[in-house]
């Protein structure tokens, strides 16, 4: 179950990142903010980094499960 949550967070981050980096969104923000658009990257970058750090933290907290177990060797 933690991998499903992690996958949904990665998908959400990618979708939000693409939406905020898209030209349509930047044009809309530029029209609404006027001269303050030059600070768009100043706000966008910390939000992107914080989201990435939160996902990486969550990912680091998931215990690793081995793909295969090594069979026990017969006592030689």
Image: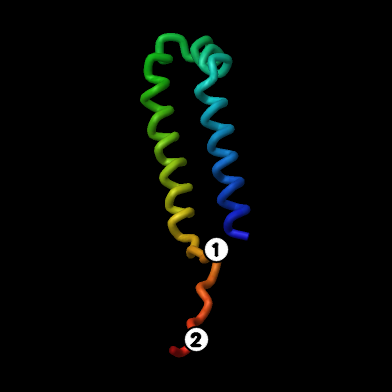
Please tell me how crowded label 1 is: few (under 14), some (14-19), or many (20+) other residues with Cα within 10 Å.
few
Q: Relative to 53, say whether 46 is above or below.
A: above
Query: Would you identify the image quadrant in which residue 42 lies?
Result: top left
At a point 62% along the width and 53% down the height, the residue shown is 4
Secondary structure beneath disc 1?
loop
Task: Point out the image quarter for the N terminus.
Answer: bottom right
Q: Which mark is residue 46?
A: none
Task: Point out the image quarter for the C terminus.
Answer: bottom left
Please tell me how crowded label 2 is: few (under 14), some (14-19), or many (20+) other residues with Cα within 10 Å.
few
Q: Residue 30, image x and y in percent?
A: 49, 12
Q: How is the image coloured?
A: rainbow
How many numbered callouts?
2
Q: Which residue is mark 2?
A: 74
Q: Residue 12, image x and y in percent?
A: 58, 39
Q: Is residue 29 left or right of residue 47?
A: right
Q: Measure how far apart labels 1 and 2 are at the Cα level.
A: 22 Å
Q: Which residue is mark 1?
A: 67
Secondary structure beneath disc 2?
loop
Q: Given the current orientation, which residue lies at the most extreme bottom position?
A: 75
Q: Residue 69, image x and y in percent?
A: 53, 72
At a point 56% along the width and 32% down the height, the residue shown is 16
Query: Which residue is nearer to you in this view: 24 or 6?
Result: 6
At a point 40% along the width and 15% down the height, the residue shown is 36
User: For the residues carrying marks 1 and 2, which lies nearer the camera in this image?
Assistant: 2
Looking at marks 1 and 2 on the same chain, the residue that comes earlier in the sequence is marked by: 1
Looking at the image, do the residues carrying marks 1 and 2 touch, with CB atoms under 8 Å apart? no
Q: Relative to 73, say whether 30 is above or below.
A: above
């Amino acid at each position: 179950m933690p991998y499903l949550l992690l996958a949904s967070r990665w998908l959400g981050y990618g979708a939000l990142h693409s939406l905020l980096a898209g030209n349509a969104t930047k044009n809309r923000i530029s029209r609404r903010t006027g001269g303050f658009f030059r600070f768009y990257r100043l706000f966008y970058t910390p939000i992107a980094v914080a989201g990435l750090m939160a996902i990486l933290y969550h990912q680091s907290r998931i215990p690793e499960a081995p793909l295969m177990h090594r069979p026990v060797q017969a006592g030689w």
